[in-house]
Image (spheres, helix red, strand yellow):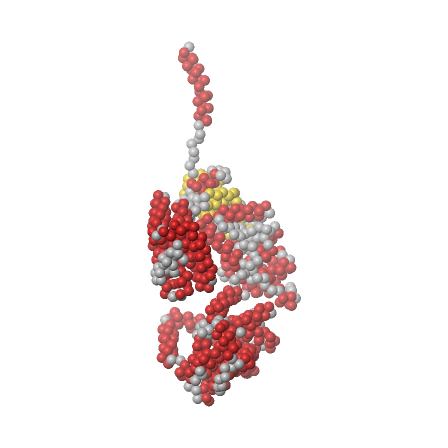
């Protein structure tokens, strides 16, 4: 009975045991992970921040030199606000500095060492020393330059001229904290910056340091730290290995195997882009096995995304009137990329198919299906129908506001089923403006024209786009719209876009085609950069060299009518130079008002360029806008003017008996210069590669240039006009100084005056200062004093001459520049 009961009880328990076994959790399957730990990354944002700090130093110095009231006011306000903290004055400043350094350095180093960041702590200590060295070097440099205004703005009770001009502890701690950072992940660094700033404010309040000195020291420290941090690299904080597996679980992917591609990270910048993640820039690729399928995992880290963000910022700065994305973080870039691909998929356009997106820490992860696979196109195998399909693909995207923005040969891809599509939509955008859509089309046209020629490209384009669409693209067909990758292709040449415009314009009437103007899509070009540089130089020259008191005194003492005569000769000189330039131009391209205004515009160019360079630059631009591509005319003008000047000097010198020429240039100096040039040229030609380069590359160019110049100078009528104009120019300038002497009652032979003036002015103009500033005045004053003119009259006459021939020409030249630009002559 008992056995039966026992068996019965056992039978009753069996099902229960089975149920309990089923309720036990299954053993967790661990994913196989093949990955490498992230290494140190060179973050280009550090270089950008260092450049910004350097710009900050320049701004602070300019403010200290030219806006002393502002810096002094800030300093006084800080000290007045500190009156409520008079107890601070009893605190020894040196002790405060030492206390701050000890507290900040120890707290940061302890945190780094606790976290086992040995390399980071060592480099931070090195940055501290380099920060001190940087402050001492900058202090020594400023003291050596010995600009008393700047030194007075920096000097304070706790600083001294020499190596101690800047508060070095600010620079040292700035460099230390920069290398030990970032502050967002290390609390000790964050509090270190707060303590440093607080201590700096206290030192300003107590007059131990100046505002200018503290700011300069902090910026010097930042530059030292940022450059050092870029060189040694920053530890990559992106997700890897098990972190990626955990992140993938949030989007329903239970990984069984995760394998990193390109395990060797020694040359990450050289890794090619992959079609499998839609050409995502700077990403790390993984092969994933999950849920019985295979996927491609693309990981984008914030630190490397900074490079892409800087590229977007540069495009935004460079392009005008064109919308550009600003993806500051990896998350922004990845999420937008996903939205682009899903939007295109909704238009039934083929793309690399995305599975989903997830984020973890400093990384954003995008997962792609592994099928169907895409391969790069073979350009030689594409037919006209293939090119039509690509254009229709882009047009379908454009019809819904999607633009690509980086169409290149790498973005043309083909799926396994043979369908062509355009990949690489990471930097694309939606809700695009008409200008962005036009630039997309221009990118595609330029690419196909480079590969297959302009005629075939335009013929195919007309099968997809109507003629009006193509014509509307003409203003956007310019180099700034074409990616660098397309310009690097073998079929590209500098005339391709011009031929493309001509091919599209064939259906237009000639007058309409010529009236189509380019749209300005770039903020910076060689022209705008040069113009900005010249403007900066001009402003500096005007505000540092203009001495209105001396000029007003000279004008008051001068005979006003003779001073105005000097101004008339200045206007006549412009007529002479215009005659020389116009003499070498074709009659149908010669605009009399344009010629004269181009010479007037030289007055503005001269203020920012060495004498002689400004006129040549303006003439070159005027000739190019008048339809001339060769520099032969400009060279002919220069040769004629130089030759006429030399002949005049020799002619007048012979017939007046003047031997001033031999005494104006020290003989030994002239011989040394000639000898050194001869030695340098001889030694260079003794080197076979240099000699080969000169013979094979430079000599043909020189011969071609000399041939063009000779053809220009051997035209009798043109040469005669050039000589007449050069005579008028030289005589007008010489007689202008003669009138300036007469304005102060000094009578001198006009021929001899012209001789001495031309010689002294030529030598003074050879000094490479804007418009010969300083050198011309010195040469004229010394030369005329040497031949017996009283020094006061020579200096006064020089001032009157420079007012008429230099200073008054600046505003007139600026007006002329605007006129020429308005009439498309400059």
| Residue furthest top as drawn | 1
As displayed, is residue 688 above or below residue 418?
below
Find residue 562 and report its horizontal and vertical position in percent. Answer: 54, 81
Identity of the residue drawn at 51% across and 77% down: 555
Identity of the residue drawn at 39% across and 69% down: 689
| Residue furthest right as drawn | 509
- Relative depth, front residue between 628 and 533: 533
Find residue 457 and report its horizontal and vertical position in percent. Answer: 58, 60
As displayed, is residue 183 above or below residue 509?
above
- Quadrant containing the N terminus is top left
Residue 585 in the figure: left or right of residue 98 = right
Total marks shown come to 0
- Quadrant containing the C terminus is bottom right
Identity of the residue drawn at 44% across and 78% down: 779
- Relative depth, front residue between 147 and 630: 147
Residue 132 in the figure: left or right of residue 545 = left
Identity of the residue drawn at 60% across and 75% down: 593
Find residue 446 and report its horizontal and vertical position in percent. Answer: 55, 60
Residue 542 in the figure: left or right of residue 221 = right
Whether residue 678 can be seen here: no
Whether residue 164 can be seen here: yes
- Relative depth, front residue between 17 and 350: 17
Find residue 608 and report its horizontal and vertical position in percent. Answer: 49, 70
């Amino acid at each position: 009975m008992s056995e039966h009961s026992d068996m019965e009880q056992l039978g009753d328990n069996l099902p229960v045991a089975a149920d309990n076994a089923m309720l036990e959790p299954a053993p967790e399957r661990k994913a196989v992970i093949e990955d490498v730990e992230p290494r140190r990354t060179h973050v280009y944002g550090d270089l950008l921040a260092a450049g910004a700090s350097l710009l900050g130093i320049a701004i602070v110095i300019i403010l200290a030199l030219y806006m002393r009231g502002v810096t002094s006011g800030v300093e006084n306000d800080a000290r007045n606000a500190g009156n409520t903290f008079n107890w601070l004055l009893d605190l020894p400043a040196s002790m405060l500095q030492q206390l701050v350094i000890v507290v900040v350095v120890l707290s940061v180093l302890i945190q780094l060492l606790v976290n086992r960041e040995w390399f980071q702590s060592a480099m931070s200590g090195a940055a501290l020393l380099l920060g001190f060295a940087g402050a001492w070097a900058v202090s020594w440099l400023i003291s050596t330059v010995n600009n008393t205004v700047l030194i007075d703005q920096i000097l304070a009770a706790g600083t001294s001229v020499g190596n101690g001009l800047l508060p070095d502890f600010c620079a040292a701690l700035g460099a230390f904290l920069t290398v030990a950072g970032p502050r967002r992940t290390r609390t000790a660094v964050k509090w270190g910056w707060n303590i440093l700033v607080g201590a700096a404010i206290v030192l300003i309040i107590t007059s131990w340091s100046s505002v200018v000195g503290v700011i300069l020291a902090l910026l010097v420290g930042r530059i030292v730290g940022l450059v050092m941090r870029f060189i040694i690299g920053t530890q990559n904080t992106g997700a890897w290995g098990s972190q990626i597996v955990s992140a993938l679980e949030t989007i329903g992917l239970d990984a069984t195997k995760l394998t990193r591609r390109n395990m060797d990270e020694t040359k990450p910048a050289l890794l090619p882009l992959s079609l499998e993640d839609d050409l995502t820039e700077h990403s790390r690729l993984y092969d994933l096995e999950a849920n019985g399928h295979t996927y491609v995992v693309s990981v984008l880290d914030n630190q490397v995304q900074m490079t892409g963000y800087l590229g977007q910022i540069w495009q935004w700065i460079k392009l005008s009137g064109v919308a550009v994305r600003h993806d500051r973080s990896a998350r922004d870039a990845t999420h937008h990329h996903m939205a682009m691909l899903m939007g295109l998929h909704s238009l039934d356009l083929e793309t690399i198919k995305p599975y989903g997106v997830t984020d973890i820490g400093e990384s954003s992860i995008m997962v792609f299906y592994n099928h169907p696979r895409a391969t790069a196109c073979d350009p030689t195998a594409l037919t006209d129908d293939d090119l039509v399909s690509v254009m229709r693909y882009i047009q379908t995207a454009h019809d819904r506001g999607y633009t690509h923005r980086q169409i290149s040969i790498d973005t043309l891809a083909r799926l396994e089923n043979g369908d062509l599509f355009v990949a690489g939509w990471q930097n694309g955008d939606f809700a695009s403006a008409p200008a962005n859509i036009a630039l997309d089309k221009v990118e595609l046209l330029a690419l196909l024209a480079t590969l297959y020629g302009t005629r075939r490209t335009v013929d195919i384009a007309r099968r997809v786009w109507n003629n009006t669409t193509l014509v509307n693209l003409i203003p956007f067909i310019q180099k700034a719209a074409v990616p660098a990758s397309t310009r690097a292709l073998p079929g590209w040449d500098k005339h391709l876009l011009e031929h493309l415009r001509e091919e599209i314009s064939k259906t237009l009437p000639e007058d309409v085609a010529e009236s189509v103007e380019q749209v300005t899509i770039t903020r910076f070009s060689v022209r705008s950069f040069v113009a900005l540089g010249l403007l900066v130089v001009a402003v500096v020259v005007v505000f540092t060299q203009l001495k209105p008191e001396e000029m007003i005194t000279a004008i008051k003492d001068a005979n006003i009518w003779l001073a105005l005569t000097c101004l008339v000769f200045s206007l006549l000189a412009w007529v002479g130079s215009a005659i020389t330039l116009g003499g070498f131009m074709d009659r149908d391209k010669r605009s009399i008002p344009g010629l004269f205004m181009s010479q007037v515009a030289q007055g503005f160019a001269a203020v920012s360029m060495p004498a002689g360079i400004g006129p040549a630059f303006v003439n070159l631009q005027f000739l190019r806008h008048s339809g001339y591509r060769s520099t032969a005319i400009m060279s002919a003008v220069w040769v004629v003017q130089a030759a006429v000047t030399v002949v005049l000097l020799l002619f007048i010198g012979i017939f007046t008996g003047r031997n001033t020429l031999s005494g104006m240039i020290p003989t030994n100096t002239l011989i040394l210069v000639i000898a050194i040039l001869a030695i340098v040229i001889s030694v260079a030609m003794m080197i076979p590669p240099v000699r080969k380069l000169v013979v094979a590359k430079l000599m043909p160019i020189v011969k071609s240039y000399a041939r063009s110049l000779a053809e220009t100078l051997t035209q009798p009528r043109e040469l005669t006009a050039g000589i007449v104009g050069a005579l008028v120019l030289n005589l007008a300038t010489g007689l202008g100084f003669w009138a300036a002497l007469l304005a102060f009652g000094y009578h001198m032979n006009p021929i001899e005056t012209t001789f001495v003036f031309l010689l002294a002015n030529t030598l003074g103009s050879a000094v490479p200062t804007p418009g010969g500033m300083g050198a011309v005045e010195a040469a004229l004053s010394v030369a005329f004093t040497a031949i017996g003119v009283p020094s006061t009259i020579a200096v006064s006459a020089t001032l009157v001459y420079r007012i008429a021939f230099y200073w008054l020409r600046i505003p007139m030249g600026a007006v002329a520049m605007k006129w020429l630009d308005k009439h498309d002559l400059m």
